Image: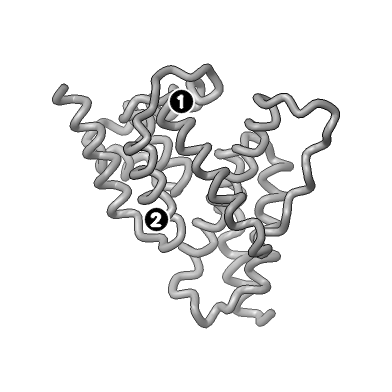
Amino acid sequence: MGSDATADFTGIRPRLVGIAFRVLGGAADAEDVVQDVWLRWQGTDRARVRDHTAFLVTTTTRAALNVATSAYVRREVAVGDRMPEPRRPLDDPAADAERAEAVAAAVLRLLERLSPPERAVYVLREAFDYPFRVVAGTLGVSEPNARQLARRARVRLAGPRRTPVDPHEHSRLLRVFLDAARSGEVARLERVLVETVRRQQAA
């Protein structure tokens, strides 16, 4: 790996650890995720990466969501005496479908447990590392209100399911979330989240 690629990763590493920590809530788990991302970065054709920051941020976000969802499933689903399978490296093509299922489960949890404003704040802040001032401006709320919504979202995500989920709404949010995670272009996801908040406010 060239020195530029190493410098690119090293320069953003604290931010990646912070993203993984906010999703997972544990320093050791966050470090594991970032180490996995580092291994993937070593094997990436960086000539095809237009924005290394967006690539590393979205890769870390997806990896942390995968770990968080897998941990949740292990807690919620009885598996008898069977130990969970070791986590596959991020660059294993066979794991793509498994990761997609994990993200689908994570998005379902957001829809089941969070109100539209809580969901919008959580996704933009925790998954895409938006500063609270930008989250607040995007949603048209004050920054203290955005912080309060984020705290409430974290509490409710740990609680029981609250509302049934429309399969079409789940499919739509999952699709735009994955598109944003893959491309680093979050504008469409922003529009969907804001539209849902405004629809609730008008109801």
Question: Height in image: 195 above or below 200?
Answer: below
Mark 2 Cα-neighbour bin, 10 Å: few <14, some 14–19, many ≥20: some
From the image, which quarter does the N terminus lie in?
bottom right
The residue depicted at 41 percent of the width and 60 percent of the height is 184
Name the residue beneath numbered marker 2. Answer: 180
**Residue at (60%, 37%) from the top-left corner?**
69
Relative vertical location of residue 143 with respect to residue 2 in this rendering, above or below: above
Identity, as a three-letter code, of the amino acid under mark 1: Arg
118 displayed left or right of 160 = left
Quarter containing the C terminus:
top left
Q: Position of residue 5 (x, y in %)?
A: 61, 76
Residue at image position (34%, 54%) is 186
Distance from Cα at disc 2 to Cα at disc 1: 24 Å
Q: Given the current orientation, which residue lies at the most extreme right position?
A: 81
Answer with left or right where residue 57 lies relative to residue 14. left
**Which residue is label 1 attached to?**
151
Task: Check whether the beta carbons of the residues at disc 2 and disc 1 lie within 8 A of each other.
Answer: no
